[in-house]
Amino acid sequence: MVLDLQGSEHEWTGFPRIEWRPSSIAETALVVCIASQDERHQIQRCRYEGGSDVIRYRTARRVLVVEAISGRAVSDEHVFAPDPRQCERVERASLRELSNDLEWGHVEEYLLRTVQAAR
């Protein structure tokens, strides 16, 4: 089950693999709670003579995994999107920032590693 950190339906609620979905609420083993908004962390400022700076951002969201019955936290981490490309020697004058969005696939990879490590 995928919820936001406040316990409401998350935009990725229907994204988990079919085999991960319980057939009923009573069979739910883990609940994944994901922040609704990305956090952006500046990782580099690229300065250009005679032009605007370009800022590279790393994007993350908090992902909390809890046991459905006990509410015990299994994992509480920030999952990061891949870093954006490096700044080029010359960039478009209109470019101000570089970043990548966090997608469900990044969270799914994290969940696979977390569940395998817990076994």
Image (cartoon, helix red, strand yellow):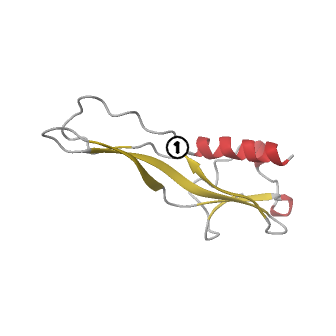
User: Residue 111's spot in the image, x, y percent?
Assistant: 71, 47
Coordinates of residue 32 in the picture (x, y in percent): 69, 58
Residue that extends furthest to the left in the rendered view of this protein = 50
Q: Position of residue 110 (x, y in %)?
A: 67, 45
Residue located 84% across and 69% down the image:
70
The quadrant of the image that shows the N terminus is: bottom right
Q: Quadrant of residue 117?
A: top right
Q: Residue furthest top?
A: 89
The answer to which image quadrant residue 76 occupies is bottom right
Q: Is residue 110 left or right of residue 54?
A: right
Identity of the residue drawn at 64% across and 51% down = 14
Image position of 60 (left or right of 77): left
Quick one: label 1, few (<14), some, or many (20+) residues within 10 Å? many
Residue 85, image x, y percentages: 40, 33
Q: Amino acid at mark 1?
A: Ala
Q: Nearer the viewer, residue 12 or 105?
A: 105
Task: Please give left or right for residue 14 compared with residue 101 in the image.
Answer: right
Q: Quadrant of residue 44?
A: top left
Per the image, label 1 sits on a secondary structure element best described as loop
Q: What residue appears at the point 62 percent right and 47 percent down from the top-left corner?
A: 107
Residue at the image position 62 percent from the left and 68 percent from the top: 8
Residue 9 in the image: above or below residue 17: below
* Frontmost residue, 114 versus 34: 114
Pointer 1: what residue? 81
Left or right, 48 with reference to 83:
left
Q: Nearer the viewer, residue 58 or 28?
A: 58
